[in-house]
């Protein structure tokens, strides 16, 4: 067991059931297979440290960037009491982290609480799609005079984000006038590049910076994720402290003492030696369902690559799948248990749930339900997680668990940072660049071409040629 540290409030990884002695040699990793990689992992650890020391891997230093924290907290405190809605406009790495922090750390029904119960803070919304029905319906439900938009885009010109921003800006302008826009819009973008930065300067919006060298999916611990978190009352200092504490654990060059390195190595070996092409993340914590969504982007966009660093065509990457315990036991577990041997599962469990409730005793003569009476819901959900893990292991299905002693900003900060570093280690193992996304860029170019952006005519032609083909359809 690779426990981050034995201090209270530390998360840990239990990888017992990823090993061959638990799930058999065909589907689990033997001690010899693991040991054989230790020198390589030490080399990777040294390399990452060197890169960081030379100013690379900027995401690793985010837990220590305290100057933003003060600015962000100041902005959050200065938000007028009449602001009842805070709407994040962004997409991908400029939204998923915000959503994850909100659903993990705020009240599960936050927006239904009275403003007083929310500590006077606004309701939170996250507009990360361009479905016209959603954008229109959200605006219909809000009062522009009482709404602030946080538009987030590192590049400053992502089509989805800028389209929603332009719609929101025009909607605000009709209600409050152009001069008041700066009281209803706050931007998070690059310090100098991109169209949004130019607009910020022209229209005088308050703004925050996405730091250089931090890619979207690694940016949750920058103003990208921290601003909306602070506005909703999340203790962002504790979040960063959790990340900093995990950074200490991730310094160990021996992967057996470093949870991020070990989990990267085990997943890499399961993929490359045991054909586990799918990585399912299944929190047994309802509040962490969006953590699984955030992980899905991090693992997919970082590791799904065609070309290795040496130029070879490799087409790497495990497919991350999001599931939720216990809900998906009644939807997905049958497949995980008896379907193809192509998956490795990660459960996320909690020692202590934020709230507890007992199941009332009733119907004593109905043994089929009476046994539940007097037990707690946390006993039930933990029993479900343990039973799924055991049944999967007995069926030779590798699975591991990350356990949080409690769910709070400090433990979530550890979990986020561990996965970010794990992704950097995995990138090095696959010998690819985990920090770019050339495949996404290609799709973005086609979309710009179709929407008539100057300079993208060639991409429009490609799309038109493709749509001119005879389509095979069925009514
Ligand atoms: O991880 C990434 O880099 C991407 O998912 C981006 O976050 C996403 O494409 C949005 O980009 P931007 O922040 O430039 O609008």
Image (tube, rainbow, N blue to C red):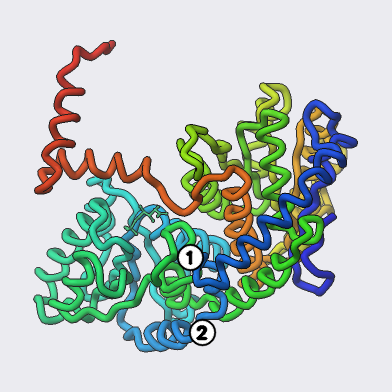
Choose top left, top right, bottom left or bottom right for residue 441.
top left
Q: What element carries label 2?
A: helix
**Percent position (x, y) of residue 23?**
84, 32
Rendered image: mark on residue 220: 1
The foreground one among 302 and 362 is 302
From the image, tell me which residue sits under label 2.
66
Q: Specify few, some or many for label 1: CA neighbours under 10 Å numbering under 14, 14-19, or 20 or more.
A: many
At a point 14% along the width and 36% down the height, the residue shown is: 458
The foreground one among 314 and 261 is 314
Choose top left, top right, bottom left or bottom right for residue 321.
top right
Choose top left, top right, bottom left or bottom right for residue 173.
bottom left
**Percent position (x, y) of residue 99?**
46, 59
The foreground one among 102 and 47 is 47
Q: In which quarter of the image is the N terminus?
A: bottom right
- Is residue 427 visible in the rendered image? The answer is yes
Q: 270 left or right of 361?
A: left
Q: Is mark 1 on a helix, strand or loop?
A: loop
Indicate if the residue with disc 2 has its beta carbon within 8 Å of ligand 1.
no
At a point 65% along the width and 44% down the height, the residue shown is: 282
At a point 37% along the width and 85% down the height, the residue shown is: 75
Q: 463 left or right of 238?
A: left
Question: Is residue 143 positioned above or below 378 on the image?
Answer: below
**Percent position (x, y) of residue 371?**
86, 43
Q: Specify few, some or many for label 2: CA neighbours under 10 Å numbering under 14, 14-19, or 20 or more.
A: few
């Amino acid at each position: 067991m690779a426990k981050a540290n034995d201090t209270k409030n530390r998360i840990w990884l239990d990888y017992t059931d990823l090993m061959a002695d638990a799930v058999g040699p065909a589907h689990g990793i033997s001690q010899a297979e693991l040991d054989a990689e230790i020198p390589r992992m030490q080399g990777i650890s040294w390399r990452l440290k060197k890169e960081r020391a030379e100013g690379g891997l900027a995401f690793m230093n985010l837990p220590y960037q305290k100057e933003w924290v003060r600015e962000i907290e100041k902005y959050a405190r200065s938000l007028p009491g009449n602001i009842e809605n805070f709407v994040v406009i962004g997409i991908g790495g400029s939204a998923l982290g915000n959503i994850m922090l909100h659903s993990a750390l705020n009240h599960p029904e936050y927006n239904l609480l009275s403003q007083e119960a929310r500590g006077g803070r606004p309701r939170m919304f996250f507009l990360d799609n361009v479905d016209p029905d959603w954008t229109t319906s959200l605006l219909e439900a809000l009062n522009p005079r009482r709404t602030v938009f946080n538009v987030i885009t590192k590049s400053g010109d992502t089509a989805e984000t800028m389209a929603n921003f332009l719609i929101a800006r025009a909607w605000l302008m009709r209600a409050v006038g152009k001069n008041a826009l700066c009281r209803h819009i706050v931007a998070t973008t690059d310090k100098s590049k991109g169209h949004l930065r130019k607009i910020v300067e022209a229209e005088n919006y308050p703004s925050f910076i996405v730091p250089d060298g931090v890619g979207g999916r690694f940016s949750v611990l920058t103003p990208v994720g921290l601003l909306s978190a602070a506005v909703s009352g999340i203790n962002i200092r504790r979040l960063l402290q959790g990340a900093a504490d995990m950074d200490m654990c991730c310094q160990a060059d021996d992967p057996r003492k470093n949870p991020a390195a070990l989990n990267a190595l085990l997943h890499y070996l399961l993929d490359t030696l045991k054909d586990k092409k799918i990585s399912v993340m299944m929190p047994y914590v309802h509040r962490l369902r969006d953590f699984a969504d955030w992980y899905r982007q991090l693992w997919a966009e970082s590791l799904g690559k065609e070309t290795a660093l040496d130029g070879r065509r490799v087409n790497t990457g495990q497919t991350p799948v999001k599931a939720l315990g216990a809900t998906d036991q009644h939807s997905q577990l049958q497949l995980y248990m008896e379907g193809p041997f192509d998956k490795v599962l990660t459960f996320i469990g909690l020692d202590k749930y934020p709230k507890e409730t007992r199941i009332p005793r009733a119907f004593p003569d109905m043994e089929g339900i009476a046994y539940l009476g007097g037990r707690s819901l946390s006993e039930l959900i933990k029993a479900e997680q343990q039973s799924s893990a055991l049944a999967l292991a007995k069926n030779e299905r590798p699975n591991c668990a990350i356990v949080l002693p409690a769910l709070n900003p400090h433990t979530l900060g550890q979990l986020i940072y561990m996965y970010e570093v794990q992704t950097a280690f995995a990138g090095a193992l696959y010998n690819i660049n985990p920090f770019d996304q050339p495949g996404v860029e290609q799709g973005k170019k086609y979309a710009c071409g179709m929407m008539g952006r100057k300079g993208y005519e060639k991409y429009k032609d490609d799309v038109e040629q493709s749509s001119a083909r005879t389509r095979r359809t069925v009514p």
